[in-house]
Amino acid sequence: MLRVLKPSGTFILNIKEKVVNGECSTYVMELILAMHKQGWLWTEEFIWHKKNCYPGKWPNRFRDAWERLLQFNKNKKFNMYQEEVMVPMGDWAKTRLKKLSQTDRKRDESKVGSGFGKNISNWVGRDMAYPTNVLHLATECSNKKHSAAFPEGLPEWFIRLFTRENDTVLDPFMGSGTTNMVAKKMRRNSIGIELLPEYYEMVKSQLSSVDVYLLEPRVKPVVSASLNHRQVKSNQLKHTV
């Protein structure tokens, strides 16, 4: 990944510790340190909150409702299109921004030395705000014949945030091909790498019928143009997937 990623690109790794003999493994922390030594910058950590996690009972822990998404970059400056994932301000703004204190009108640095700060007055009169680093998405109900399938909304959010149309998305752990299918819907090029031939064949067959209007109103396509588009894409996929 370090060799093929563009200097302006981003690597997002979805990973979670496993439990061995009643104890959480440390391999995620060890992996982060190893990647740092390799030359990666650990830029951010996102949390996927799984809204519909299965109930259960364990002697020494609660049910698992989240997974990590680690962001790595090669440089401190990278492509990031934050406006693509903005969210409504919410009802809190009606009361919180109605009457500002003197502290709210200037940058207020963190009192615990975290390096973060805020200027509340910057958000007066705005309808949209930047999101948090916690994504609230339900798990994939049908596992697509794969034990670790995730919802399409997960790769879609990161593809919106870090890429533009016609950029290339690489999934080195393709599995059931969710990332590749979402990338195609969003008019990105994609490459998938998979060890198991059965997953490769499954994804190749599914990609040929993906609708590419995920982010736009559906319109009736011109038949001839649609066929030509699919033929071109089919030829491209034979060389990339």
Image (tube, rainbow, N blue to C red):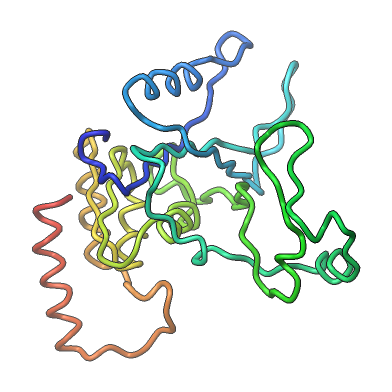
The number of numbered badges drawn on the structure is 0
In-image side of 23 versus 103 (left or right): left
Q: Position of residue 93 (x, y in %)?
A: 81, 67
Q: Give 78 or 165, whichever is nearer the viewer.
A: 78
Q: Position of residue 35 (x, y in %)?
A: 37, 24
Q: Image quarter for residue 232? A: bottom left
Q: Image point 32% across, 72% down: which residue? A: 212
Q: Give 99 or 67, whichever is nearer the viewer.
A: 99
Q: Image point 45% across, 58% down: which residue? A: 161
Q: Image point 33% across, 26% down: which residue? A: 39
In-image side of 30 versus 8 (left or right): right
Q: Position of residue 50 (x, y in %)?
A: 62, 45
Image height check: is 225 above or below 120? below
Image height check: is 127 above or below 130? below
Q: Give 61 or 79, whichever is nearer the viewer.
A: 79
Q: Image quarter for residue 200? A: top left
Q: Image quarter for residue 149? A: top left
Q: Image point 54% across, 38% down: which residue? A: 45
Quarter holding the N terminus is top left
Q: Position of residue 99 (x, y in %)?
A: 91, 68
Q: Give 228 or 101, whichever is nearer the viewer.
A: 101
